[in-house]
Image: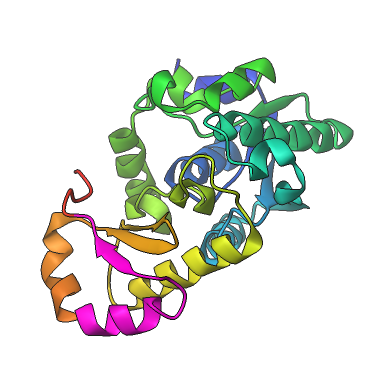
Amino acid sequence: MTIEEFFQKYPRVAIAFSGGVDSAYLLYAAKKYAKEAAAYYVKSAFQPQFEFDDAKRLAKELSADMRIIHIDILSDRQIASNPKDRCYYCKKKIFSTIVEKAQKDGFEYLLDGTNASDEENDRPGMKALAELSVLSPLRMCGLTKDDIRVRSKEAGLFTWNKPSYACLATRTVTGEEINEILLSRTERAEDFLTTLGFEDFRVRTLEGGAKIQIRENQMELLMKNRKKILEVLLKDYKFVHMDLEVRGE
């Protein structure tokens, strides 16, 4: 099945939209082939401002119908307590909320951007998607991450080479209580490193300190800015460590 054939079968759809590579291409394809599509963006403490800005920018460039849902994600103890299966509870809450809103808006089908490269074992949230009957057309059509990047570039989407991004909650250690202070600290640290030119990196929490994970090709940039990074991050963290097991390709 091609993506065009998918939208012939499902002509009116709601899309769980994050502003990332996959959901951006899915929204583009829906705008091109579906009869009606609406993008639902869930704004919570787990999403940084830049993701929200990217989502709004893309929706505007595609002249897409983007609907914003605000969720107090930290009010849910099953999520804020940060258990091993936090991702499942988080996905369940977010997608249940989207399903409810989309159905009220007249949409029978909700889509997400899971692609054919995503392994089910690596995505605990997939269980929640299956329980809610969320459809993943990119996966159903056999489109891998590389396929989606190529197609996105051909379509002129600015997201085509955007690094993969996981929500701010993933920077925490399992069992560590998640709160606004911790999330804001992480966002500030990562925003700062972005201004220095870092891409596709993480600043994880470690017993009150920061553990920086970067690509190997940015080690020189890190050493060049070492003193500046320490000066800024030590305002929020007890210590700053560099993870020598760099982020993989």
| Left or right placement of residue 122 versus residue 34 in this view | left
Residue under the image location 16 percent in, 64 percent down: 218
Looking at the image, which is closer to me, 188 or 238? 238
Residue under the image location 71 percent in, 24 percent down: 109
Looking at the image, which is closer to me, 107 or 52? 52
Q: Position of residue 179 (x, y in %)?
A: 64, 57
Q: Position of residue 21 (x, y in %)?
A: 43, 46
Q: Which residues are magenta?
A: 226-243
Q: Indicate yes or no whether the magenta region holds residue 15.
A: no
**Residue 17's quadrant in the figure?**
top right
Residue under the image location 59 percent in, 25 percent down: 7
Q: Position of residue 237 (x, y in %)?
A: 43, 71
Q: Classify the position of the N terminus by image quarter.
A: top left
Viewer can see residue 157: no
Viewer can see residue 4: yes
Reply above or below: 3 against 74.
above
| Left or right placement of residue 135 versus residue 108 in this view | left
Q: Classify the position of the C terminus by image quarter.
A: top left
Reply above or below: 184 against 33.
below
Looking at the image, which is closer to me, 234 or 92? 234
Q: Indicate yes or no whether the magenta region holds residue 236.
A: yes
Residue under the image location 47 percent in, 75 percent down: 236
